[in-house]
Every structure is written in structure tokens, then in C-alpha cells.
Image (cartoon, rainbow, N blue to C red):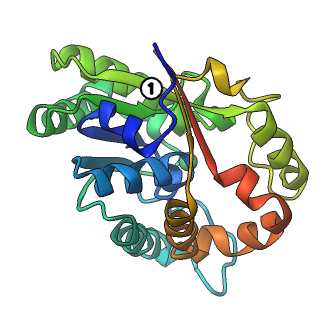
Amino acid sequence: MQTIKTQDDIKKLGTIMGIWAHPDDETFTMGGIMAAAIRNGQDVVCITATRGEKGVQNESRWPAARLGQIRTDELKAAMKIIGVKKLYWLDYPDGECKKIAVEDALQQIIKCIKECQPDSILTFGADGLTGHPDHKAVSSWAKKAAREAGSKAVIYHAIQTNQQYKAMLKVDKQFGIFFNIDKPPVCEPEQCAICFELDDVGYAQKHAALKAMPSQYETLLKAFEDSLQLSLGTEAFLCV
Ligand SMILES: [Zn+2]
């Protein structure tokens, strides 16, 4: 299969469903892909398992008690910038996805799959990309739900290119993005099923969407400044 690289190639993904754990996972991994698909006139749907209320970075500005609502609003703002209208929340507690009854999660996701009939499902791999247990749980739900729904959707797993990972490592000491994993899965661009290089328009949209989530990205975007385009300007996935 040829690697999906361009906005025109994105058409091959048909109706896209993202299945993610926290508000911002979708934008970080597939913000540019979603924006390109919307420009192509494709349908894009996002499922988010939690409201991300555990991701406290600054208690005085974004207090824990209100963070779930803040991040819900931030995701809505980000998706408005990207152009995604269909958002589904599974409403599970942040950090607790592993403890959720699998049947409950499957039931909710299967319902969405039947409703939206995705051709492509983009999610985490079994490693959870950063090793986060919620990411791993969501990955396994996506696979099971697609199978149980009888969906023919192709499942794609988020991955980083070697180049991106190197850029990320520079800021990882400060942020501990990969705190749950020794080394995330990495690959060379030609090994990916999708290796989408964002154009200026798409990159600007993705950057603006991340900026619309200041509770998570204000500090990160500043720290990334030097290597920002390298880290965020490519979106890579493997085909399952
Ligand atoms: Zn996450």
C-alpha cells in the first residue's frame, strides 16, 4: 500500500473516526489530517473517552475542580478551528479507563461506529504512544468495537517518525510526555501507512487549535518553539 502523504491522498481515508482518550490527543496526532479531510469534504468524527480533568498544569489559572469543563470547552473551540462538528464523549474519569467495564465502553463506541460508518479509524497503538494507560485502553476498545460492530474500517495507529521523536526528546525532560514508556514506537516515514506533511494552511489551523487549549498547550508550545514545526508538522500512522 502506498503511503498517504498529500491532501489528495487523504481522500482515500473516506469517513474518518478518531478514537482518543483525552481532549487534545486528537489535535496533536491528527489535527492536520482532520483539517485536510474537512477541506476535501469528508466526514470527520471524534470520540474522546475522558474530559482530561487530571491534567492540571497550573492550579491557579486552571483549577482541578473546573478542569473537566475547561478542557471540554477548549476541545470544542479547537474542533471549531479544525472544522470538526461531530464530537462524542464517553465521559469516563481521566486516568481510570483501565478500570471501566469494557462492555460499557464497547457499547458506546459500537453505537458511534454504526451511526457514522467510518472507513478509517485513527487511534493509539497498543503501546499508547506515550505509554499512558488511558491511551492503551482506548486502543484496545477501538479494535474490539470495530470488530464487534462488523465494521470494515481500516484501523490506523499513531506513531512518531524518528525525526519527530528526536525533536520531542528535547522538551520531554521538562514535560515528561513519555513518562510511562522508555521509548515510544518510532519509524521511518516510508514505513508509515500515513505520513502526512501539513501544508502552511493546515499547520496554521493545527497550531491555532492547540493554542485554543491553553490549559494543556500554553507552556508546551513555548518550550517547543525551536522544533515546533518538526514535531507537529508531520502526522504519522501505521496500518494495523
Ligand atoms: Zn492523552
Residue most extreme to the left = 115
On the rendered structure, is 144 left or right of 203?
left
Above/below status of 159 relative to 232:
above
Tell me: 224 left or right of 109. Answer: right
153 left or right of 4 in image: left
Q: Which residue is mark 1?
A: 156
User: Residue 217: percent from the left, percent from the top?
Assistant: 64, 69
- Residue at 51% of width from left, 32% of height from top? 124
Q: Quadrant of the N terminus?
A: top left
Image position, residue 233 (x, y; %):
64, 52
Q: Looking at the picture, does residue 36 appear above or below residue 202?
A: above
**Mark 1 packing: few (<14 Cα in 10 Å), some, or many (20+)?**
many
Dividing the picture into quarters, in which one does residue 165 lie? top right
- In the rendered image, which quarter is residue 226 located in? bottom right
Q: Residue furthest bottom?
A: 60
Q: Quadrant of residue 145?
A: top left
Seen at 62% across and 67% down, the residue is 216
Horizontal and vertical percent for residue 140?
A: 43, 22
Which type of secondary structure does the marked residue at label 1 adopt?
strand
The reply to whether residue 131 is in sight is: no
What residue is at 14 percent from the left and 32 percent from the top? Answer: 117
Residue in front for this viewpoint, 189 or 49:
189
Residue 163 vertical position relative to residue 216 in the rendered view, above or below? above
Name the residue type under label 1.
Answer: Tyr
Foreground of the two, 91 or 1: 1
Residue in the foreground of this view, choosing between 194 and 166: 194
Instruction: Tell whether circle 1 marks a residue whose Cβ is less than 8 angstroms from ligand 1.
Output: no
Q: Is residue 143 visible?
A: yes
Residue at position x 56%, y 52% in the image: 198
Q: Is residue 119 above or below residue 205?
A: above
Residue 155 in the image: x percent, y percent?
A: 38, 23
